[in-house]
Image (cartoon, helix red, strand yellow):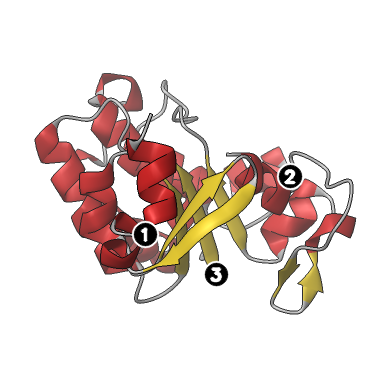
Amino acid sequence: TTVLDLICGRTKATEGTIKFRDKELTTMREHEIVHAGVGRKFQNPSIYEELTVFENLELSFPRGRSVFGALAFRRDAEVRDKIEEIASLVFLKDSLQTEAAILSHGQKQWLEIGMLLIQSPELLMLDEPVAGMSVAERLKTAELLNNIIHNQSVIVIEHDMKFVEDIAHRVTVMHQGKILSEGSMDHVKHDPKVVEVYLGH
């Protein structure tokens, strides 16, 4: 989580560099990092519960950065098409007119992922996205992430190893702020250092 906080600018680095697309992120403010193409989802979904799924996605559409600008733009065909495309991707196409408050926990997580995806980030960072989800929701979230990695890079912080196995192309194990092991899931699982630190205690 601290690594994600550093990348998105929520926590300021005291030393070192963080490069993304040849841009130095440590000198940028949080909103500048978002505009540079980095999207971040926190553990708890931050959605507008009193609004519908459609309205949540509409407000997240990158059009007019003031509140008035975001609320006042026309619902043109481009916006509606994009909202429907993203809603379909995050399994909410049949819930567009549903108030976000009555969605299940998993659906709220998918909605927030959709709110990030509609902004077309080049890098999407998710912090424990399946915490509190049912088994069925976890499987669908794995399906979702495996679909979106064709269009953007995704970093997931997760302690559910079965879920990691379902989604990860490369696994990085961190311990006390340092990289302990990196590679395929199979490589990491059998790395003696990882076994000692995580399975030996």
User: What residue sits 38% from the left and 64% below the top?
Assistant: 82
Label located before the other in sequence (3 or 1)? 3
Residue at the spot of label 1: 191
Which mark is in front, 2 or 3? 3
Q: Give the residue displayed 34% in from the left and 76% down from the top.
A: 150
- Give SS at disc 1: loop
Q: Which residue is mark 2?
A: 66
Q: What percent of the width, then of the height, locates residue 165?
A: 23, 56
- SS for dot 2: loop
- At 32% from the left and 42% from the top, the residue drawn is 110
Residue 30 visible in the current orientation:
yes
Above or below for 192 versus 47: below
- Residue 122: which numbered mark, if any? 3
Q: Position of residue 158 (x, y in %)?
A: 39, 42
Regarding residue 55, the answer to whether it shows in the image is no
Label 3's element? Answer: loop
Kindly report the distance in space between the C-alpha atoms of the residues bearing marks 2 and 3.
23 Å
* Residues at discs 3 and 1 in contact (Cβ within 8 Å): no
Relative to 66, say whether 17 is above or below: below
Foreground residue among 118 and 41: 41
- Between label 1 and label 2, give the one nearer the viewer: 1
Classify mark 3: residues with Cα within 10 Å, few (<14), some (14-19) or many (20+).
Answer: some
As drawn, the label of residue 116 is: none
Q: Tag 1: residue type?
A: Asp
Q: Is disc 2 surrounded by few (<14), some (14 to 19) or many (20+) residues within 10 Å?
A: few
Quadrant of the drawing holding the N terminus: top right
Inter-mark Cα distance, 3 to 1: 31 Å
Give the camera-side residue of 180 and 192: 192
